[in-house]
Amino acid sequence: MGFSSFETKQVLVTGANGFIGSSVVKAFAANGASVTGIIRQNSDLSKLDDFKNKVDLRIVNLEDAVAVNELLKEIRPSYIVHAAQPSAQAAYGLSNPKELLGQLNLTATIATNLLEASKNYLPEKFVHCCGSAIYGNLNTSPFSEDCEPMPDSPRGLIKLQERNLMRYYAQNFNMPVVLGRIFRAYGPWDSSKKIIVKALDVYRNGGSLPLSPEPFMRDYVFIDDISEGILRMCATDLPNGTELNLGSGTQYSAAQIVNELEVLLNDRIDISTEKFPKNFLDKMQYSADLSKTRKLLKWTPSTSLKDGLRATIKWHNWVNEH
């Protein structure tokens, strides 16, 4: 989908070298926007290799309120996408409450700095990349935005705190902040810690893929569809504080994903059945209710699982051959 309204507009993306952030950067740049991407010192920029000359990358410490305010004063972005994520450790569990408190303080500081600077230099839209981890086990799938968030993991708690800050500023300072609740993103440049790239690594390099016998489900949504959803959130007139699910509405188990890969590869992936420690992501039912998103954004994912996996295989082959 083309977004002519973004041509020549200034856009700021945090976490610009990350999986979601880099995809958003590319989508905006492809639609003619002038994109500034915030990265950390020594960030891995491989996801942006083809776009480094199309984006202004800035090393900015988001914990520094003065630095954040100065950047917004300089570029005056029309759109801000906050895609910077908690640490990888926070995504998979923290070992003690002190570490969790540190992550909560860090992400709250970053969110507050961005929101305070945005109050001074108000964008047309501020999109926060939230996550489905805020729903928790006590809610019933398919998850609706009307569910009360009840996170049951460190990542869920962190994302809920960010979400609450975003909604507070939207409601109390009349700021155009909206939130995308992102489900299981996958596609080219996905993490090697996730099942799809893990399976492709095993297929290419040998060995066996450890797989739980339990049919835990995920809602898989292709990364380009997520980026389109985020751009639509920027381009659509939405009430301040609106929250929208960005998922596929369909759930798959890890075994089903591996089976789909085997069909596309026309070959078997060696699997070893193992028991794993309890993971907060392990749920027997896990899918997004897209009713509200369809109504307000006129958006549904356009990439089938087969086509998304095919694109991921093609990327994986390219990465390993270069």
Image (cartoon, rainbow, N blue to C red):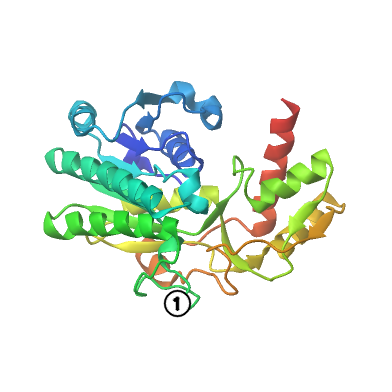
Question: Label 1's element?
Answer: loop
Q: Is residue 227 above or below residue 179?
A: above
Q: How many marks?
A: 1
Q: Is residue 281 above or below residue 77?
A: below
Residue 286, horizontal then vertical, whole percent: 54, 70
Q: Is residue 33 left or right of residue 287?
A: left
Task: Identify which residue is drawn at 65% across, 58% down.
Answer: 305
Q: Quadrant of residue 304?
A: bottom right
Task: Identify which residue is drawn at 61% across, 68% down.
Answer: 217
Looking at the image, can residue 298 be seen? no
Q: Is residue 125 above or below residue 297?
A: above
Q: Is residue 249 above or below residue 52?
A: below
Q: Residues within 10 Å of mark 1 (few under 14, many from 20)?
A: few
Q: Is residue 25 left or right of residue 79?
A: right
Considering depth in this image, is 298 or 15 the residue closer to the camera?
Answer: 15
Residue 246, horizontal then vertical, whole percent: 45, 60
Q: Is residue 230 left or right of residue 303?
A: left
Considering depth in this image, is 188 or 191 the residue closer to the camera?
Answer: 191
Looking at the image, can residue 262 be seen? yes
Name the quadrant of the C terminus. Answer: top right
Residue 271, horizontal then vertical, whole percent: 82, 56
Residue 47, horizontal then vertical, whole percent: 54, 32
Identify which amino acid the numbered label 1 is placed on: Leu
Task: Identify which residue is drawn at 27% across, 48% down.
Answer: 108
Residue farthest along the top direction in this orientation: 53
Considering depth in this image, is 36 or 143 the residue closer to the camera?
Answer: 143
Q: Which residue is mark 1?
A: 138
